[in-house]
Amino acid sequence: MSVYKVIRIIGSSPTSWEEAAQNAVAEACKHLRDLRIGEVEQLDLRVEDGKVVEYRTRIHVSFRYEGTG
């Protein structure tokens, strides 16, 4: 039987929401093993002087839970 933990991560990009999601997953993979599923929860952006300067993607990701005992 497998157990998975779900966490929320947020990525950002000056280019697109897709790149923001890819950045978030790439960083999470540096610290977590066996990421399985990602679900986009929210998309938002930051505007300065009437221009979009940053795209942000909030994602729920799951990974295999390995307990201590």
Image: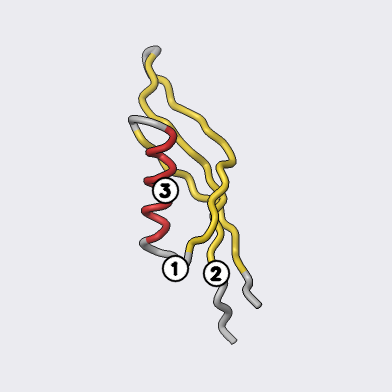
Pinpoint residue 45: horizontal percent, then vertical percent. Answer: 46, 27
Q: Amino acid at mark 1?
A: Arg
The residue that disc 2 covers is 64
Marks 1 and 2: in contact by CB < 8 Å?
Answer: yes
Which of the pair 45/39 is nearer the observer? 39
Judged from the image, the secondary structure of the residue bearing numbered disc 1 is loop
Q: Farthest residue in the top direction?
A: 50
The residue that disc 3 covers is 24
Residue in view at x 53 percent, y 51 percent: 38
Residue in view at x 57 percent, y 72 percent: 65
Pinpoint residue 28: horizontal percent, then vertical percent. Answer: 42, 57
Position of residue 35 relative to residue 54, above or below, is below
The residue that disc 1 covers is 33
Q: Amino acid at mark 3?
A: Ala
The N terminus sits in image quarter: bottom right
Judged from the image, the secondary structure of the residue bearing numbered disc 2 is strand
Q: Farthest residue in the bottom direction?
A: 69
Pinpoint residue 39: horizontal percent, then vertical percent. Answer: 57, 47
Marks 3 and 2: in contact by CB < 8 Å?
Answer: no
